[in-house]
Amino acid sequence: MRPDRNVALAPLARWQIGGPADIVVTPGTTGQVSHAVSVARDCDLPLFVMGDGSNMLFDSRGFRGIVLRIGPGLDALAFAGTRVTAGAGIWVPAFARQLALRGLAGLEHVVGIPGRLGGLVVMNGGSQRKGIGTHVRHVTVVTRDGESRTLAHADLGYSYRTSALQGSGAIVTDVVLELEPGDRGVIMREMIEILASRRRKFPKNLPNCGSTFLSNPAMYDKVGPPGQAIEAAGLKGVAIGGAQVSPLHANFIVNRGGATSDEVLALIALVRGTVQNRTGFAMDCEVRHLTESGEERPAHEFTDAGRFDRSLLDRIDRSDA
Ligand SMILES: Cc1cc2nc3c(=O)[nH]c(=O)nc-3n(C[C@H](O)[C@H](O)[C@H](O)COP(=O)(O)OP(=O)(O)OC[C@H]3O[C@@H](n4cnc5c(N)ncnc54)[C@H](O)[C@@H]3O)c2cc1C
């Protein structure tokens, strides 16, 4: 495991935003994960763990610490009937296809999600209002003390797009899931339909992080999902610098070229504030922000605390709205 120094984060993130990280390591074994944790602790350096960066807004100033990328190398897969043990680094669409080939049903909805299994399990990701957590039996994590521990489903605090793993510091290395027996052809057909529908709905030509804001049931009942509320507020196509509310799907913020993390945060503040003023509902972010010094939380927690460049709100561009 060779550490790389001064690595640009933008190419590692789906938004293609992010300055240099001091160190990036890609472990190939759980032992190497523990080793990286001890090095960070001994050197008193912040440690950030990522999968594919598909839900991350990295700081354009970079990150003064160690980034641990959980990806290929930690992607083993083993089947025992309907029980599946998978490494946290496995690519989610490839994992979904493996399940289909084995006739294992229940996770068809994750087939189009561009992340690693560890990230999906931490985010309780999914689509069609489902989350992977339902199928997680237990996970193996490396704690910030460098120790390996097994956490059962009941310890994981799953609810819509959240889990107790978020912000806990625990690094997921392996996941055990329980699936249902199904028909391979039926599962495949459902996955193909899901992929086709995603291709129709989601912007694909410009870098983005998927849905920016979380849907919340009370808001959904009164004013609809975030995309609808943002569009109704006249914000579709609105931009600040390189960050733009997608003209195709208003809950996506796209990088139309050279967007900075400050521009995305300012746009998030504008959208959240405008929708709240109109509807009374404050939309929380699904996307997470990592600051230069290593704080990592949902992006709206930074904008609510005024931790964004307010002067950018003078540069709102409505020409494509
Ligand atoms: C085009 C597009 C479409 C998307 N569609 C969906 C969708 O339909 N449904 C959905 O739920 N999401 C969707 N997303 C968001 C994103 O893909 C998911 O949240 C995904 O699960 C994140 O996985 P990742 O490996 O990229 O994690 P990252 O973005 O790298 O990290 C996300 C969080 O997980 C933590 N993390 C990652 N790996 C680990 C690990 N091994 N151990 C501990 N913590 C870890 C990180 O620290 C961070 O807090 C979409 C994103 C894009 C770009």
Image (tube, helix red, strand yellow):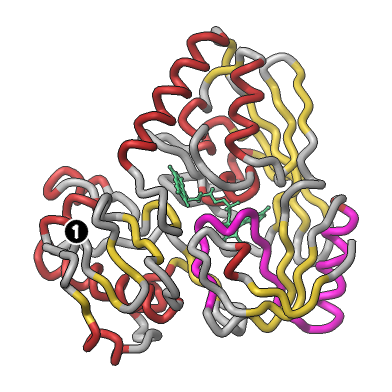
Q: Percent from the top left, x then y, of residue 241?
A: 33, 78
Q: In this view, does 144 lie above or below 304?
A: above
Q: Name the residue under label 1.
A: 230
Q: Is residue 294 above or below residue 105?
A: below
- Tell whether circle 1 marks a residue whose Cβ is less than 8 angstroms from ligand 1: no
Query: The N terminus is located in which quarter?
Result: bottom right
Examine the rendering and report whether any part of residue 129 can be seen: no
Q: Percent from the top left, x then y, of residue 186?
A: 48, 10
Q: Percent from the top left, x then y, of residue 162?
A: 47, 51
Kind of residue indicated by mark 1 = Ile
Query: The C terminus is located in which quarter?
Result: bottom left
Q: Is residue 49 magenta?
A: yes
Q: In this view, does 232 lie to the left or right of 285?
A: left
Q: Is residue 29 left or right of residue 54?
A: right
Q: In this view, does 222 lie above or below 208?
A: above
Residue at horizontal 12%, vertical 70%?
A: 277
Q: Is mark 1 on a helix, strand or loop?
A: helix
Res. 23 image quadrant: bottom right
Q: Does the magenta stretch include residue 245?
A: no
Neighbor class of circle 1 (other Cα within 10 Å; few <14, some 14-19, many 20+) is many
Examine the rendering and report whether any part of residue 158 can be seen: yes
Residue at horizontal 76%, vertical 47%?
A: 72
Pick whichever, 65 or 313, lies toward us.
313
Residue at horizontal 54%, vertical 79%?
A: 291
Q: In this view, does 240 lie to the left or right of 152?
A: left
Q: In this view, does 178 lie to the left or right of 15?
A: right
Res. 64 image quadrant: bottom right
Region in magenta: 31-59
Q: Percent from the top left, x then y, of residue 282?
A: 24, 64
Q: Is residue 63 above or below residue 279?
A: below
Pick whichever, 107 or 115, lies toward us.
115
